[in-house]
Image (cartoon, rainbow, N blue to C red):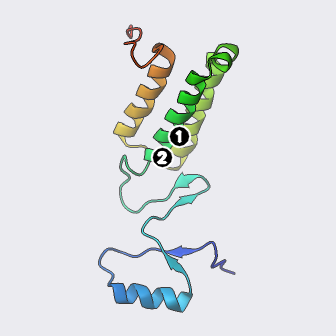
Amino acid sequence: MINFHKSSLTFLKNTTAYDRQIVSSVLNMTHQDSLGKYLGCPVFKGRPNTKTFSELVNQMASKLRAWKEDKERFQSRKSGTKQANIESMSAYTMQCSQLPSMTNRNIDRISRNFFWKKSNDNKGLPMVS
């Protein structure tokens, strides 16, 4: 049985508005441009781009920002625990699809800035090879 409350339709770009309306009304389902998520991973048509995974990058940045603002919690937890938590967020998504290289660079930059910069004004420690 199809659960019509949880289901939605998506169409190709060349589908006319009339055809979209007819199919939506016959199936009694809503139409969405985005396919949304399945089991926490974004579902997309075609080749993924940085916009597809922007929510993942924003989620990681906001989590790290909250940890950095909470000085007491920042001092009490081990940095390895934080690093493992951050990496697990992206690792689960990487199991579903390959992330674009720009998204990988953004995730690395956010993580690196969290561990090596004391504040937004500070340049931070230099990377050493």
Question: Which amino acid type is shown beneath numbered disc 1?
Answer: Gln
Where's residue 93, x and y in %? 53, 45
Quadrant location, the N terminus: bottom right
Q: Is residue 66 above or below residue 91?
A: above
Residue 92 located left or right of residue 19? right
Is residue 89 in sight in this rendering? yes
Q: Residue, x 49% and y 59% (percent of image)?
A: 43
Q: What label does residue 59 carry, if any?
A: 1
Q: What label does residue 55 carry, if any?
A: 2
Question: Which amino acid type is shown beneath numbered disc 2?
Answer: Glu
Question: Which of the 4 image quadrants contains residue 113?
Answer: top left
- At mark 2, the secondary structure is helix
- At mark 1, the secondary structure is helix
Q: Is residue 39 above or below residue 89?
A: below
Is residue 98 in sight in this rendering? no
Where's residue 127, x and y in %? 39, 11
Where's residue 26, x and y in %? 52, 92
Determine crowd level at label 1: few under 14, some 14-19, many 20+ residues with C-alpha closer than 10 A. few
Q: Residue, x 44% and y 47% (percent of image)?
A: 53
Q: Residue, x 55% and y 87% (percent of image)?
A: 27
Determine crowd level at label 2: few under 14, some 14-19, many 20+ residues with C-alpha closer than 10 A. few
Q: Is residue 77 above or below residue 54?
A: above
Question: Which of the 4 image quadrants contains residue 11?
Answer: bottom left
Residue 13 located left or right of residue 25? left
Q: Residue, x 56% and y 86% (percent of image)?
A: 28
Q: Is residue 118 above or below residue 40?
A: above
Dot 2 and dot 1 residues touching (CB under 8 Å): yes
